[in-house]
Image: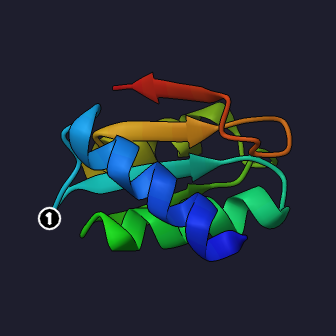
Amino acid sequence: WVDKASSALASNLIRERSIGKGDVVALSGEPCSGFAVAQLATWKAGACSVVLAPSHPPNELDYVLKDSGAKLILQGKKLNLATTLPI
């Protein structure tokens, strides 16, 4: 199921969010299976990712986002992928 879910998300990232080679996607959420799906989907789309740890202070998260040039944040309480935020 991980392969199918990550392929579907990768397709969405490419078509709906214009994510591709050289782009950066930020992943935010508690460790869960959805996190693995999001990571794999990001790679399948040709992008790389940065992890935003919810336990880090807001100023550190802001720094990581700005420094990485992330184009999109995939986030969720358990990273169920229901919420995506363009940057």
At 28% across and 40% down in the image, what residue appears?
71
At 54% across and 67% down in the image, what residue appears?
39
Residue 1, compared with residue 28, is above or below; it is: below
Residue 37, compared with residue 69, is above or below; it is: below
- The number of numbered discs placed on residues in the rendered structure image is 1
Residue 44, compared with residue 16, is above or below; it is: below
- For the N terminus, give its image quadrant: bottom right
For residue 2, which quarter of the picture?
bottom right
Q: Tag 1's secondary structure?
A: loop
Residue behind mark 1? 22
Q: Position of 40 compared to 80: left or right?
A: left
At 70% across and 61% down in the image, what residue appears?
35
Q: Position of 24 compared to 28: left or right?
A: left
For residue 54, which quarter of the picture?
top right
Q: Position of 53 compared to 42: left or right?
A: right
Residue 72 on image: x %, y %: 37, 37
Depth check, front residue: 32 or 65? 32
Residue 41 on image: x %, y %: 46, 64
Residue 18 on image: x %, y %: 18, 39
At 34% across and 45% down in the image, what residue appears?
13
Residue type pointed to by label 1: Gly
Characterize the local packing of mark 1: few (<14), some (14-19) or many (20 or more) Cα atoms within 10 angstroms.
few
Depth check, front residue: 24 or 79? 79
Depth check, front residue: 85 or 63? 85
Q: How is the image coloured?
A: rainbow
Q: Position of 43 compared to 82: left or right?
A: left
- For the C terminus, give its image quadrant: top left
Residue 12 on image: x %, y %: 38, 42
For residue 15, which quarter of the picture?
top left
